[in-house]
Amino acid sequence: MKIPQIPNNEQKRLKTVKSYNLLDSLPESEYDDITNLVATICDTPIALISLLDRDRNFFKSHLGIPFSESPRDISFCGHAILENDILIINDARKDERFMDNPLVLEMKAIFYAGVPLINPKGLPLGTLCVFDHRPRELDEKQIKALKTLAKQVIQLFELRRKNLILNRTQKELKTRNEQLKRFASHVSHDLKSPLTNIISLTDLIRSENPENLSDDTNQYLDYIEESTTILQQYIDGMLMHYKSDELLKDKLQDVSLSELVGNIKTLLTKEEDRLNSSDVIIKGINKAALTQILFNLVDNALKYNDKAIREITIEYEDLEDFHQFKVIDNGIGIPENKLEHIFEIFETVKSDFGKSSTGIGLSTVKNLVEKLHGNISAESTFGKGSTFIFTIEK
């Protein structure tokens, strides 16, 4: 018996085999279907998908034998991975490499045909092979089918490897995102206190020395207060953006839309503003998330409105699988070239009437809507107003 040679790139090959996370894995129907098919096509009692480990031949799928691995030094597959093409042994009893092999003597492995499973980087991982208990041959159609199915096995291996990479990347992104949330939270809280002190200090300067302040000084103080307020808005927006996922933990409940909108109206609008909504009870919805979504959309509509009377209407429609909402305003509208970007974080629409925005609110809205398995879009006529349409899955 001739023990299979070790490939020159064995260490790299072994590392690659392990990277697929297939060794010692449980049977899977995708692989068993292939061995069943190849056994039928080749008319053999045994069909295997093997992976060559350091000292063993592991069978990812093993039709016709009761064990899932065998010693590498007696394996036919150890010889097959050294080939660039199919290895066919018509009668192992007449081949000096195998004639006294235990597989031949004890298990009657007389006929063998194996195609090396070569990955895209050219490394042989194992084989797709068939055995028979009698000497025989394969015709051209059977050989072609065996080679074709070997390619399918490699495709399954590669899909598995890419899924492993994807899962690992998702875990890394989740970890980094959690770190970013903690960082944003710490920085935001650390910044809010000194900003509050700055505003308090400007108020103190005004109250203690009103008659001694020149117009220029008052203008500078106004600038300090305005800049500090804008920075506070950014910080509040960042905190809400990174904490928005916490709202998703809220339980589903029945919600009065008019009552919810009434609370938002109290917080955001002036006496002359008109904020109207459908008078309906919405069944089974995340109230906390819906409140934040509508709050941000109404806040955005008020900021970008130059009318003497700012009008906002919130409509609700009960669809088969979704709750649908429309937030309609009579504001300045959104330029066409900005529509596709307005939900991107820090994206803003410039206005000519002194209002400013952080560009975080709509991004937070989109994030919440998508986490609730819905969609959001915007329609707008520049100078006349906008309509935001969003859905939430029931």
Image: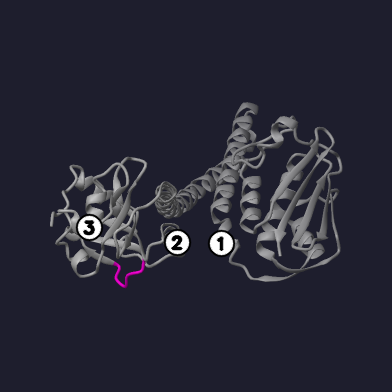
For the point 56% across and 58% down, which residue is it? 245
CA gap between label 3 and label 2 equals 22 Å
CA gap between label 3 and label 1 equals 66 Å
* Mark drawn on residue 27: none
CA gap between label 1 and label 2 equals 55 Å
Task: Check disc 2 and report its element: helix, strand or loop.
Answer: helix
User: Whole-percent x and y of residue 217?
Assistant: 60, 30
Is 64 a magenta residue?
yes
Which segment is the magenta one?
62-68
In this picture the colour scheme is one colour
Q: Residues within 10 Å of mark 2 (few under 14, many from 20)?
A: some
Q: Is residue 361 above or below residue 130?
A: above
Task: Check disc 1 and report its element: helix, strand or loop.
Answer: helix
Q: As rendered, which of 90 and 39 lies closer to the eye?
A: 90
Q: Residues within 10 Å of mark 1 (few under 14, many from 20)?
A: few
Q: Quadrant of residue 392?
A: bottom right
Q: Quadrant of residue 57?
A: bottom left
Front disc: 3 or 2: 3
User: Whole-percent x and y of residue 247?
Assistant: 60, 62
Q: Which residue in the structure is indicated by mark 3?
A: 92
Q: Residues within 10 Å of mark 3 (few under 14, many from 20)?
A: many
For the point 40% across and 52% down, which residue is it? 157
Q: Quadrant of residue 182?
A: bottom left
User: Whole-percent x and y of residue 251?
Assistant: 64, 71
Q: Amino acid at mark 3?
A: Ala
For the point 64% across and 47% down, which residue is it? 361
Quarter of the figure with the N terminus = bottom left
Q: Which residue in the structure is indicated by mark 2?
A: 40
Work out whether mark 3 precedes mark 1 in sequence or the reverse, and give the earlier one.
Answer: 3
Q: Which residue in the structure is indicated by mark 1?
A: 246
Q: Amino acid at mark 2?
A: Thr
